[in-house]
Amino acid sequence: MKIGTGSTKKVRKGVLARQSGQTPSDLLLLAGAPIVGAAAIIGYAAWKQGGLSSVDPILFAVAGIPVAAGAAFYMRAKKRLVEITSVIEALRISSDSTVSDTELFVSESDSGPGKCWNALVRSRSHVVAVQEEPSSTAHQAADNALTRLAIDSYSDALCLIGRDGDVLICNFAANQFFGSSDNSIAGSNIKDYLEGEALDAVADVLSGRVQRKYSIDINRQNATNQNNEVFRFVVTPIRGNDRAAASIIVQDVTRQQLAERGRHEFLAQATHELRTPLTNIRLYIDEAIEAGDEDPKARAEAINVISHESLRLERIVSELLDISELEAGARVVDQGDVRVEQLLEALKSDYVSLAESKGVTISFELPPKIPVLQGDRDKIAAALHNLVGNAVKYTPNGGSVVVRAEDDEGVLRISIEDTGIGISPNEQERVYEKFFRSEDDRVTEIEGTGLGLAFAKQVAEMHGGELSLESEINKGSTFTFAMPKPRLAA
């Protein structure tokens, strides 16, 4: 059997088609009640008086009044009650989205509820038609508003350029970059705002000489802080559009360039620091081999240098790994009790003999009781070792180093004060940079990697504290390692 053969189609009838002309039963009862009552009164009178002929004619007249009133009420209310019933039916099915307006019409009289209902249905149809007619225009306007909001929220400058170079669309960032946030550059020619390589890039794309994305970096001086900024100027041809020929995106890549430069400098410094001990190890291995058993003294000296340089290499690699892991967040901070009093005693035993060998006096001024901190004991110990070690290292013969612990409210401060060579004001902001070494000749003569302060600062900040510096050239420096004390449980 073919699809559809033998099937029957159900036709849904509207309210008007299903509207019954029969009298509602409730109305019949209501209208018939006076008639039945009048008949009962007349029957009772006839029974009392022995027949209908004996009944007073006035009683017939009085009984006929409710009969006439019931008939009049029936004739008047019948049509309206039918209309009310149909309106109720129409209201019931109007919530169905598949019901058309035609199916909602009911029969109507000149002043009945059916006429009012049908008028409402017709007005509803008109409103829906009016709303649906401009829907595409409304949606288009909404899309345009969203598009404008989207491109204005874009942080990079964005422009669409016509084939003659006129700016068709630009966002807020483009107005700021090329002109002013108060005056849009849309409608003007982009060539009025470009020069040099940027102008050549746009001309090449508009002329068709370049048919791919074209990107160049442009240096521009910031008028506010007089620093150079780097902007990436990207021109992309647009195909298949009669109006737009190219798009221009300008990105501020200053921070990216600085980060890239810092990475290259870090690698260069790390390579240099690692190469020095490796070169010495290689040279003294050769010397030890050449000396052999014939010159035990020279071989012993070579082995001693190899051991020293191996420890130096191990320290550099360890510091590099510690800093890299802290910056990357790869290592989780071990939380535990940090007994600072024990750490300071260990520092005292480690550096007293070293300081005396250099002719430097080292003293520890500690309160009777030092609070127990919460944090990574090994990292805090390493940070304090770097600070005390630097103080002893950069303090000349006859100088002094004082380590103090101060229990302030909510914070424990450990300050390391020395009478060393000091740090010049223009270098104090850079001492926490990785591999930074002062240009002072006295510093270059002392062995160091420039990683200790960077590590100590990161450890302090990782524990919610800070590392601060006060220094004066040729008078000394004071580094203060501050960490918050743990809150007592309520």
Image (spheres, rainbow, N blue to C red):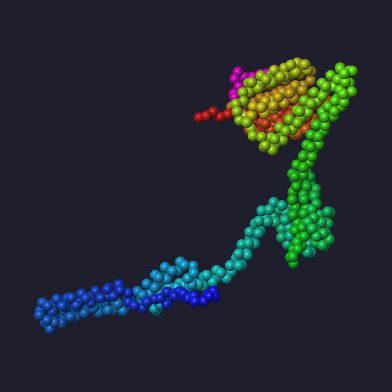
Q: Nearer the viewer, residue 115 or 81?
A: 81
Q: Is residue 133 left or right of residue 89?
A: right
Main SS of the magenta part reads: loop
Q: Position of residue 376 (x, y in %)?
A: 64, 29
- Which residues fall within the magenta stretch? 363-373
Q: Position of residue 118 (x, y in %)?
A: 44, 74
Q: Can you give x and y, in whole percent of width and height, for residue 123 in the image?
A: 48, 72
Query: Looking at the picture, how far across and down is residue 195, in whole percent?
Result: 82, 55
On screen, residue 95 above or below 432: below
Is residue 76 positioned above or below 311 on the image?
below
Q: Residue at point 72% right, 54% down? A: 157
**Is residue 117 on the magenta stretch?**
no
Asked whether, in this view, residue 431 is left or right of residue 340, the answer is: right
Q: Residue at x 15, y 78 (%)?
A: 43
Q: Give the residue drawn at x 78%, y 28%.
A: 313
Instruction: Kindly tell me whether residue 474 is visible in this rendering.
Output: no
Relative to the observer, which residue lies in front, 435 or 58? 435
Name the quadrant containing residue 334.
top right
